[in-house]
Image (cartoon, rainbow, N blue to C red):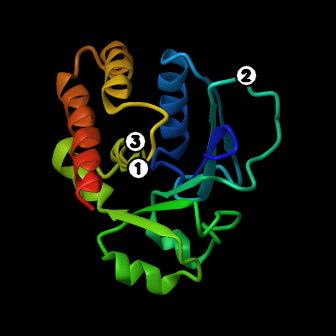
Amino acid sequence: MSKGMTEIRWHGRGGQGAKTAALLLGEAVVASGKYVQAFPEYGPERMGAPVASYDRISDKEILIHSPITNPDVVLVLDETLIDTIDVTKGLDEKTGILIVNTPFSKEEIQKKLTWKGKLVVLDATKISVETIGKPIPNTPMIGALLAVTNFLTLDDFIEDTKKKLEKKFKNKPGVIEGNINAIKKAYEEVKKQ
């Protein structure tokens, strides 16, 4: 975040919405007048396989088109990935932020890591089940991200996302309301940490 742009890496499993989250965030950032790159990285394309997605956000035009190797923020949608993937690779211990979706405590997750930087934990899956009715943690994780960064306000993200959800789910108001509530609930939970 100190290099004039914010670089974000998302880790998840196929079907958890890491790609969708990166794209939703990217579209909201563009709507706010900033520049963005949002892109996935695919391995085996199957449900449950590890996937990664990325966002690069800047106030100025982004002229680089390389992979993100030193992210400012890493979001982990499935905490079991910590056991098989180096989710903190390239993440600076002094300035980086790691956000993990888990029912476990910060101390329990910290024991699994060699990385000792800023760690935020929340049970985004539980939040999504309570608000949306399905275990899809991507929108609550965006709420957590917005709580620890300053490139986009919660209100701006919700306004943009609500418009997109209203187009896609116009006959399912519960899906729209559930996702908005999930984002807000995660945001508030992380702000209390």
The amino acid at mark 3 is Leu
Residue at (81% x, 28% y) in the render: 63
Contact flag, marks 2 and 3 (Cβ < 8 Å): no
* CA distance separating discs 3 and 1: 6 Å
Label disc, if present, on residue 61 of the rendered structure: 2
Percent across and percent down for residue 161 are 37, 24
Residue type indicated by callout 1: Val
Q: Quick check: can you spot residue 11?
A: no
Question: Mark on residue 146?
Answer: 3
Task: Provide the secondary structure element on which disc 1 rests.
Answer: helix
Label 3 environment density (alpha carbons within 10 Å; few <14, some 14–19, many ≥20): many
- Residue 104 on image: x %, y %: 31, 75
The residue beneath circle 1 is 148
The residue sitting at 45% across, 44% down in the picture is: 149
Q: Secondary structure at mark 3?
A: helix
Q: Nearer the viewer, residue 170 or 120?
A: 120
Mark 2–mark 3 Cα distance, whole angstroms, equals 22 Å
- Number of other residues with Cα within 10 Å of mark 1, as a class: few under 14, some 14 to 19, many 20 or more: some
Q: List the single residue furthest toward the bottom.
A: 111
Quadrant of the image containing the C terminus? bottom left
Which comes before the other along the chain, label 2 or label 3?
2
Separation of disc 1 and disc 2 at Cα?
24 Å
Q: Which mark is residue 88?
A: none
Confirm whether residue 23 shows in the render: yes
Q: Amino acid at mark 2?
A: Glu
Residue drawn at 65 percent across, 38 percent down = 5
Left/right of residue 52 with respect to residue 157 in the rendered view: right
Q: Nearer the viewer, residue 181 or 33?
A: 33
Residue 181 sits above or below residue 166 on the image: below
The percent position of residue 95, horizontal first and vertical second, equals 58, 60
